[in-house]
Amino acid sequence: MLGLPSVPASAQEPAEPFRHGVSILGDVKYPPGFAHFEYVNPDAPKGGTLRMSSTGTFDSFNPVLDRGEVAPGVVASVFDTLLKDSSDEISTGYGLLAEGVSFPDDISSATFRLRAEARFADGEPVKPEDVIFSFEKLKELNPLYMSYYSHVVAAEKTGERDVTFRFDQKNNRELPMILGQFPVVPKHWWEANGADGKPRDIARTTLEPVMGSATDGRVKKEEYENPFRARGVMQALVPNMRREMFKDQRVRKALNYALD
């Protein structure tokens, strides 16, 4: 994570100051402007090839839907969130796409201010419209997020780089924190035409790499055939014993002998 710059003023400045991080349990560990988490090596070698394994298969690159099998790594590798969870703190997040979050004492709402330098993989700036689009589509199309954000009743643009979420309950310290966890997807990409020339539909699965995040030859899929793969250890045949043919005890015994 890069350092967190100071938060500039806006035309609709919230009454409460912006925080660089938020925690359900109280104060956060890292100060404003920290360069990196303590568990991160800023001098780690860069470059080379990363090979990752995955069990199973996939049939979609759409991170919004609960239908289909989303390719492993798509959400974490292609999309960012408003906050970044801290791995050495409990229920704590720091600004990632957002440079700060503000909420009143009664926590009836939360306002996130996007970083001016926040960009998608295609170089387009991340805007409040993208955040609102992502949030609304996740609640509309994914039952998990519909339940997870059930107390968030509205999302609206309240400044050039500000998005405010309204809650239907007060004093829930978890809501500002979990609102920083959903993936922000590019509205401009989903509302444009796809590679086939037809309009894209975020309500359907797709195998078109989002924003050209994967190209032929740069990403290769290899399948390992397990020579020790075996069929299930148990198989069962459950007959309907109410059927007339099974009233004969000899038939039932014959079936048992045949399958034993």
Image (spheres, rainbow, N blue to C red):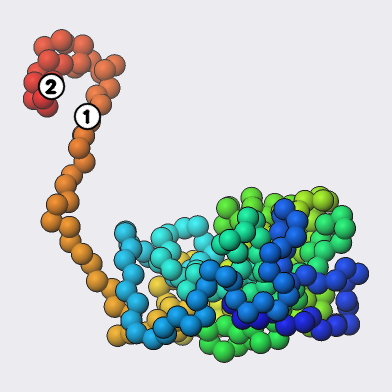
User: Which residue is nearer to you in this view: 57 or 96?
Assistant: 96
Q: Position of residue 148 (x, y in %)?
A: 64, 52
Q: Please tell me whether mark 2 sits on a helix, a strand or a loop.
A: helix
Q: Amino acid at mark 1?
A: Leu
Cβ atoms under marks 1 and 2 closer than 8 Å: yes
Residue lying at the far right in this picture: please name it.
15
The answer to whether residue 138 is seen in the rendering is no
The amino acid at mark 2 is Leu
Q: What quarter of the picture does the N terminus occupy?
A: bottom right
At label 2, counting other C-alpha atoms closer than 10 Å, the crowd grade (few under 14, some 14-19, many 20 or more) is: few
The residue closer to the viewer here, 34 or 96, is 34
In the rendered view, would you say 126 is above or below 17? below
Residue highlighted by disc 2: 255
- The residue drawn where x is 53% and y is 84% is 121
The residue depicted at 13 percent of the width and 21 percent of the height is 255
Q: Residues within 10 Å of mark 1 (few under 14, many from 20)?
A: few
> Picture coordinates of residue 16 (x, y %)?
88, 68
Q: Nearer the viewer, residue 105 or 202?
A: 105
Q: Residue 236 in the image: state x and y as whole percent.
A: 22, 31
Q: Is residue 30 left or right of residue 171?
A: left
Q: Taking 112 as reference, is 7 above or below it?
A: below
Can residue 46 be seen here? The reply is yes
Disc 1 or 2, which lies upstream in sequence? 1
The quadrant of the picture occupied by the C terminus is top left
Residue tagged 1: 237
In the visual, does 82 lie left or right of 58? right
Tell me: residue 152, above or below residue 40.
above
Q: Does dot 1 land on a helix, a strand or a loop? A: loop
Residue 146 figure quarter: bottom right
Q: Residue furthest bottom?
A: 123
What is the CA distance from the residue labelled 1 to the residue labelled 2? 10 Å
